[in-house]
Amino acid sequence: MEGIDRAEIKLTRGVPATEAFPIEEIIACSAQVLRDHGKTLLQYQPGIGFLPLREIIASQAGVTPEQVVLSNGSIQLVTFLAEVLLSPGEVAFVELPSYDRTITTLRRAGVKVVGIPLEEDGIDITFLEEAVKEHHPRLLYLIPDFQNPTGVTTSLAKREAIVSLAKEHNFMVVEDIPYRRLRYQGGDLPTLRDLDAERVIQLSSFSKLLSPGIRVGWMVAPVAIARRVTQIATDTYITPNMLGQGLAYEFLHEGKLENNIARLRRLYAPRLATMLHALSQYLPQASWINSEGGFFVGLTLPEGANSTQVAEKARKKNLVLGNSAGFFADGDGSRFIRLPFCALNEKEIEEAIKRLAFAVQAVNK
Amino acid sequence: MEGIDRAEIKLTRGVPATEAFPIEEIIACSAQVLRDHGKTLLQYQPGIGFLPLREIIASQAGVTPEQVVLSNGSIQLVTFLAEVLLSPGEVAFVELPSYDRTITTLRRAGVKVVGIPLEEDGIDITFLEEAVKEHHPRLLYLIPDFQNPTGVTTSLAKREAIVSLAKEHNFMVVEDIPYRRLRYQGGDLPTLRDLDAERVIQLSSFSKLLSPGIRVGWMVAPVAIARRVTQIATDTYITPNMLGQGLAYEFLHEGKLENNIARLRRLYAPRLATMLHALSQYLPQASWINSEGGFFVGLTLPEGANSTQVAEKARKKNLVLGNSAGFFADGDGSRFIRLPFCALNEKEIEEAIKRLAFAVQAVNK
């Protein structure tokens, strides 16, 4: 514990635990897929991506392979979707707060981004109804399972209300589900695409389930949208990176991905439990989401405490906190702190929350 | 020869010979680099790319690693450069004809693309001088070695004239050199960046030297431009694909890339020789560039023959030709045909040119 007391702890980026990467399995799967599909993986290929991987994802999603588009990570698919679905100046809704990179990406495409306040069970539906009438959005982007940055999971009732409003007011829903398989307790809810396959576009990736460095994200969408996204992808980079796609395919094909996800759940579940317990113990005056999975717990500081000031105090105790402002498309995030727990071990998590509590106390003095 | 006579032959895309991919070496290098650098390659990384690979490229180019940006193929770097160097409506010059994907990419960025006629030793410098005064371009994009689609190599005198004009009239030069190392005869000329490192941005990739499917392109640029491109890359995809970069690094680090390039030269040199000989034999009435390397010979049909009509006739003889129009930013490409020779063996090349000659003759009747 002495070592931890002095060492810097970062509670900033939502990255997987490096020690969780199954390097030897990745080496074996790379070799196997290159032996079986090397001439395909090493050549230029259609911009939609590696057919055998698209076939498995399509089969799991109950769609045809032409509805599955693979890309170099899922965030670039957000750029492509912005080009397909929105013209500059049109409005997209996101949760408030939401994933900062999506907000940045939509704004770079010239889209006006409006935040819909997030409650403990998903966005505020009454607020959404009013905002739809005011802004006539072309799409709503959300992360329904273990949301980034809060950890919130959208309830079934709200999922149904969202797709119903989307149909009524003719906007598309983009559900981003990179954390969905990382559930540490409780049971799965239907995806929004399960509720309305014509109105909902699903994004996900292997970044949290296998490795971010392999850059394999995917989209499941209606055929017309998948085709338009593919054309833009082709114009952008000709071919997505095939080695990562081959590797992901081999993990799925051999049934190794399920084992890896089970292993990650065993690794991350106690980290989340430790985080929630430490918050109860050291910061009972704050509030947070009792997330059941994913990478993050979203913390709201007690009134009077400001996250920037807390971050400054924490820095002096060698605890590095992330900047909250980027998550808030509009509205006030000054009391919010995202706590990513996956890349820290239990001792580091407990120590981090002790330091955080110290910083909050120092600010409130 | 019977089999070849009937089989379809494609003279369309500029892709490497699939049989040239060193699959077993790629398997071995992937395993080695994952053992040595797996925790880095599998994690999120800075948008600029894998440092060990940037260090080797920087050392070979005589620059610092912060001047080297890696990306998922080089064409996406053209998008990033357009965003950094040009505002919508501003003018970029390209060779006439030029690489069709670059023209498309610049136009998608809202840039006005103007073609500078290409002669046997590079662009027409007199035309360039006049066009500079008329259009005030922000950049000139060219492929000085074994140009796509013509095979032209820009002479030293023209290289010097180009960088001199760039300095005088304050525009940047982007030299794309993916084929430079694939010289089958003659000697290297200095790169444009060798002549003016402040004014010239160099793009290249491993697509033609190792594999396109690994998607590893790079840029060597002044530091300020490299930083701005890196920021846009990070906002676009967070991290480029690391497996491909690790593999390319291992090939360079172990000295295997030089062996592979030597092997490709031995494979491709007789294909180019066969192409040039077959043209002399079967199409003496046409004209073409006696390219010394790369992937392409650019053919100009005899007067009166039209490439679209020739393509239709060729199709009936099971020879598929590419569309020429995309290479011509402006001006008339109706007598031009790009002949990619690398992915065909010598028998296929000879048969292809026989069929092409038949098609030309049929049109001229």
Image (tube, coloured by chain):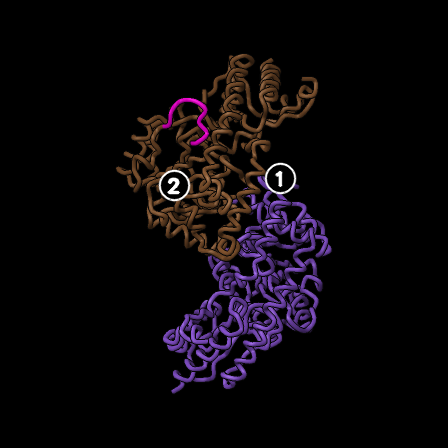
Chain colours: A purple, B brown
Q: Which residues are magenta?
A: B180-188
Counting other residues with Cα less than 10 Å from the Cα at mark 1, is it few (<14), some (14-19), or many (20 or more)? some
Q: Is residue A33 above or below residue B278?
A: below
Report the residue that reaches farthest toward the bottom. A365
- Residue B183 part of the magenta segment: yes
Chain under numbered label 1: A
Indicate the position of residue A210 as horizontal and vertical percent values.
Answer: 59, 57
Q: Is residue A66 above or below residue A160?
A: above
The amino acid type of the residue labelled 1 equals: Thr
Q: Which of the two residues, A70 or B304, is positioned nearer the viewer here?
A: A70
User: Could you tell me if residue B107 is visible in this image?
Assistant: no
Report the residue that reaches farthest toward the left. B168
Magenta region's main secondary structure?
loop
Indicate the position of residue B349 as horizontal and vertical percent values.
Answer: 58, 21
Disc 1: which residue = A40
Q: In the picture, residue A363 is in which quadrant?
A: bottom left
- Residue B80 part of the magenta segment: no
Indicate the position of residue A104 as horizontal and vertical percent values.
Answer: 47, 61
Report the residue that reaches farthest toward the front. A2
